[in-house]
Image: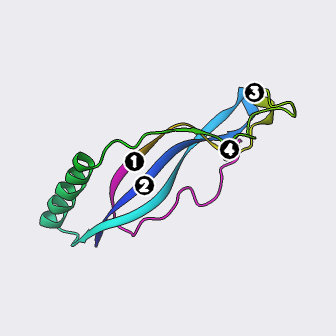
Amino acid sequence: MLHVNIYEVNQCYGGPEEGGWYYTAGDFIRCIGTFPDNKEGRQDAEALREAYLEAEPDDRYLKMGYGPHDGVDADGEPDDRYLIPGGAWGYSEIKALIQAHKGMNYPETRPYYC
């Protein structure tokens, strides 16, 4: 079976190594359809994915870590030394993906700098 899964995708702060690094994380929102894993099913899944993306407004909004306390020092002044790893930064994006499994948040565990 193919699943058309909807995700909110963000860039999350990974840590301060090498001047700071980020990774992509997807929060599963919902599955909007399932189709057989064959040529016709793939075409139907792609049509549903495209229809969903056309019908839904681009719900991009600015994320600033875990909230107003993230990325500020004790006086409330912005300071990157106080960023909390895993916090989403920048504009989120809504994506519809065709996958062989029901959607789930990704990555399963927060990556580490190597």
Judged by depth in the image, the label closer to the viewer, 1 or 3, is 3
> In this figure, which residue is indicated by the disc labeled 2?
7
Q: Which residue is located at x 65 percent, y 34 percent?
A: 21
Where does the magenta region start and end?
94-114
Answer few, some or many: residues within 10 Å of disc 1's Cα (few below 14, many 20 plus, some between 14 and 19): many
> In this figure, which residue is indicated by the disc labeled 3?
78
Q: Measure the alpha-carbon separation of dots 3 and 2.
A: 30 Å
Q: Measure the alpha-carbon separation of dots 1 and 4.
A: 20 Å
Query: Are circles 2 and 1 on residues that touch, CB within 8 Å?
Result: yes
Q: Which residue is located at x 23 percent, y 69 percent?
A: 37
In the picture, which quadrant includes the C terminus?
A: top right
Q: Measure the alpha-carbon separation of dots 2 and 1.
A: 6 Å
Q: Give the mark, 3 or 2, whose residue is nearer the N terminus.
A: 2
Judged by depth in the image, the label closer to the viewer, 4 or 2, is 4
Dominant secondary-structure state across the stretch colored magenta? loop
> Which amino acid, mark 1?
Ile
Query: Are circles 1 and 4 on residues that touch, CB within 8 Å?
Result: no
Query: Is residue 43 toward the left or the right of residue 58 in the image?
Result: left
> In this figure, which residue is indicated by the disc labeled 1?
94
Q: Which residue is located at x 46 percent, y 60 percent?
A: 28
Residue 67 is labelled as 4
